[in-house]
Amino acid sequence: MAATLNEIIENFDLLDDWDDRYRYLIELGRELAPMPDSAHNEDNKVRGCASQVWLETHVDQSGGEPVLHFLGDSDAHIVRGLVYLMMALYSGHPAREIIATDAQPLFAKLGLDAHLTPQRSNGVRSMIERIKADARAALASA
């Protein structure tokens, strides 16, 4: 992933217009690491999203506490950007940290809490629930 969470926040601060912010989200979505076709399956599908969203979870337990890495994709451009945002927030972090991290302050800081449709907000919540469920499962099996 090219942009870090801090860079995304800084870039959002530079963009005053919401059309520009949406375009930036779409650009972020284009930066997502490609998911293999085989990962676009029912097991990886996120339920509760109006768009098609897939999350593939890889757990690294080599350092003791499990660290989760995610690949994500969507069939909708803005949603791909939201997937990118979730990857920047959660991917590469220990399971306990993922469980403890609330995405709401980030969405408030970026203004997304007020500018996403209710359907998209529900989809983001579904993604977060899925990520945290995978983190809990990784801890349980560690």
Image: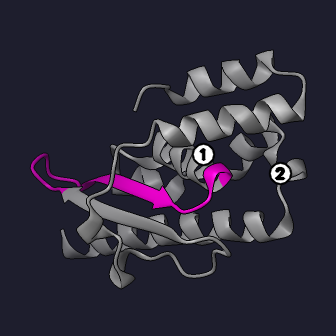
- Residue 24: quadrant of the picture: top right
Q: Is residue 10 left or right of residue 52?
A: right
Picture disc at residue 59: none
**Quadrant of the drawing holding the C terminus:** bottom left
Picture disc at residue 113: 2
Q: Secondary structure at mark 1?
A: helix
Q: Nearer the viewer, residue 35 or 90?
A: 35
- Rendered location of residue 111, percent (x, y): 84, 40
Residue at the disc numbered 1: 81
Q: What is the basis of the colouring in this image?
A: one colour
Q: Earlier in the sequence, mark 1 or mark 2?
A: 1
User: Distance of mark 1 from mark 2, alpha carbons?
Assistant: 15 Å
Q: Dot 2 surroundings within 10 Å: few (below 14), some, or many (20 or more)?
A: some
Amino acid carrying mark 2 in the image: Asp
Q: Nearer the viewer, residue 141 or 29?
A: 29
**Quadrant of the drawing holding the N terminus:** top left
- Rendered location of residue 81, percent (x, y): 60, 45
